[in-house]
Amino acid sequence: MYTENKQKLADIAVNIGVNLQKDQLLVINSPVECADFARLVADAAYTAGARDVMVNYGDQRLARLRYDHASLETLTTVAPWVIGKYLWIVDENAAIISIHAEDPTVFQGADASKIQAASNAIQEATEFYSQAISNNDRRWCVISVPTPGWAKRVFPDCTEAEALDRLWEAIFKTTRTDQPDPIAAWEDHDRNFESKCTFLNDKQFDAFIYSNSLGTNLTVGMPKNHVWAGGSEVAADGISFFPNIPTEEVFCAPHKSRVNGRLVATHPLIYKGQLIDGFEFTFKNGQVVDYAAQVGLDALKSLVEANPGSNFLGEIALVAHHSPISDLNLLFYNTLFDENASCHFALGSAYPSCIEGGTQMHRDQQEAAGLNYSLTHVDFMVGSADLSIIGVDGDGHQTPIFVNGDWAI
């Protein structure tokens, strides 16, 4: 079912997402449940002239068994061949497509501290790979396709087959796969980001003030010479690509030490397979000094305390409350979609491209300029129908950016 649209989505990932070039290597990261779609992506890649395609499969249920039964020492040991694989991917100038389709229920009840320790170990051992991604040294794209567990979480009152169908339809709509010419639709969508980015980059606001009726009252300072981006980006090789499909966000990096106030999340978050809901943060001079959650407090604690820098913000992103994804009125339990239905922030590392010359700076220069660094980068949603965002320039003049959850510029 949906054979034609599935192939179109695979084509979008290859030709718009990573903009694969002739004779380039493609790496696909995929859950085992998505093997059929991974094959479609591989087929699209070979059709586009790929030199070769390598697929890395992951299995959440196998990972759960490992977290439940393996020792902490085993979980935090990273085999040399794993590091070698990531080195090879970077050295080969591969393009990377990651299929993100977690079942939100698999890790419920698992030891959050063991999951975080295992995650830290692999992130530390392969930091060079993460840096190649965040610096846009390699072209990369994250997409999602349905799995039974995920579909049932989104549509709990449907049969598994019905839930899968409805989730496929939602994905086709939000990724513009259902358009007569999806590639042209994405090129047109990309042009729509330009006016917002140009306005914000020209204004160079010193800070933004967030407020809504849920209790958010936050001031976010910005670094000097910051750069807003959205839609396609340009990699180090000069070739454009879309890191996320779908995408509706315009984003930047806040100054790590100039965030103060209370920030209330408006959507649940799945972190390392565990649900966090009804949560909020209090910031002082950029740092999380207090936090609370109605569900998943231990998981939230592991996020905030994951590693140095994980308790500071690394991203500020603006998304209209009435966006194509938000208007579906669905909670996807998948950050790729939920972050594009709502204004959001990210705890953890900033993208160096968010300040002028940032990708050419050493890390100490980036941090001196106000960029946060961490092994993690986790988005969480804060948008609401009554969200107000005010831009404040260097002279204190205020400009409404968002009124009642939507763009005012």
Image (cartoon, rainbow, N blue to C red):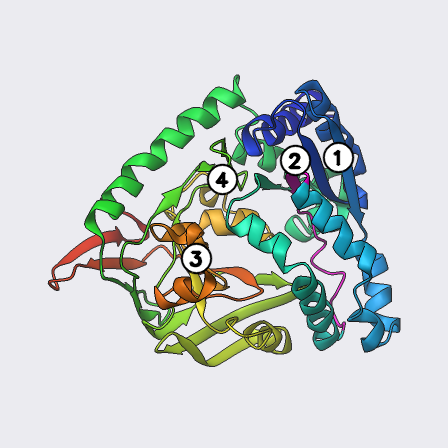
Q: Which residue is mark 3?
A: 344
The disc, 2 or 1, on the residue closer to the chain's N-terminal end is 1
Q: Which residue is mark 1?
A: 38
| Disc 1 secondary structure class | helix
Kind of residue at badge 1: Ala
Q: Which residue is mark 4?
A: 236
Nearer to me, 44 or 95: 95
Q: Is residue 316 visible?
A: yes
Kind of residue at badge 4: Ala
Q: Which mark is residue 168?
A: 2
Residue name at image x 42 percent, y 49 percent = 353
Distance from disc 2 to disc 3, alpha carbons, whole Å, reads 25 Å
Residue name at image x 24 percent, y 52 percent = 401
Q: Quadrant of the C terminus?
A: top left
Q: Which residues, given as a range, are shown in magenta?
A: 92-110
Distance from disc 1 to disc 3, alpha carbons, whole Å, reads 29 Å
Residue 158 pos. (x, y %): 71, 45
Q: Give the foreground label among 2 and 3.
A: 3
Distance from disc 2 to disc 1, alpha carbons, whole Å, reads 15 Å
| Disc 3 secondary structure class | strand
The disc, 1 or 3, on the residue closer to the chain's N-terminal end is 1
Farthest bottom residue? Answer: 289
- The kind of secondary structure the magenta stretch mainly shows is loop
Categorize mark 1 by other alpha carbons within 10 Å: few (<14), some (14-19), many (20+).
Answer: many
